[in-house]
Image (cartoon, rainbow, N blue to C red):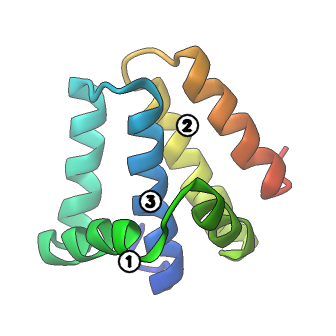
Amino acid sequence: MFTSLTYEERLALVGLIKWLTLSDLETTPGELALIDKVVKELGEGEYHRLFNEVDSRFKGFEEFSAFVTATGSTAARRLIYDFMLEYAEADALDVNEGRDLAWLARIWSLD
């Protein structure tokens, strides 16, 4: 599923997981299970490299937002968005996650 994504698309995916997790300051058991799914597919080393690159490459949300806005094919954006929606809904979608997903759908022109 995610192995077909380009490096930049995988970086966006991992960064979005991190960002959405921080939006409600909680990682639920359902979210952890989905993170484990991504880690298993990408490989633990690759996931951690991407996770660390998010911190080193983007100094704040504005830089990350600009990167995400310009990243991904339509198919990759849909795949990532659908996963992020599943991630947010894993144990109940909260207000912050809903706002963040609406932002992502808007910048990626997803309906």
Kind of residue at disc 2:
Leu
For disc 3, the marked residue is: 15
Q: Secondary structure at mark 1?
A: loop
Mark found first going from the N terminus, 3 or 2:
3
User: In the figure, is residue 21 to the left or right of 81?
Assistant: left
x then y, percent, for residue 23: 48, 32
Quadrant of the rendered image containing residue 51: bottom left
Rendered location of residue 101, percent (x, y): 65, 37
Left or right of 62? Residue 1 is left
Instruction: Give residue 59's mark.
Output: none
Along the line of sight, the residue nearer the viewer: 43 or 51 = 51
Q: Considering the image in quadrants, where does the N terminus appear? A: bottom left
Q: Quadrant of residue 78?
A: bottom right
Distance, label 3 to label 2, CA atoms, is 15 Å
Which residue sits at x=30%, y=25%? 26
Q: Identify the image quadrant of the C terminus.
A: top right
Few, some or many residues within 10 Å of mark 1 (<14, 14–19, 20+): few
Return the residue found at the far bottom: 6
The residue at 46%/80% (across/down) is 4
**Alpha-carbon neighbours of circle 2 within 10 Å: few (<14), some, or many (≥20)?**
some
Residue tagged 2:
85
Tag of residue 3: 1
| Residue 29 showing in the rendered view | yes
Q: CA distance from mark 1 to mark 3?
A: 16 Å
Q: Is residue 69 above or below residue 102?
A: below
Q: List the single residue furthest toward the front.
A: 59
The kind of residue on which mark 1 rests is: Thr
Residue furthest to the left in view is 44
Question: How far is disc 2 from disc 1 in space, using C-alphas?
Answer: 19 Å
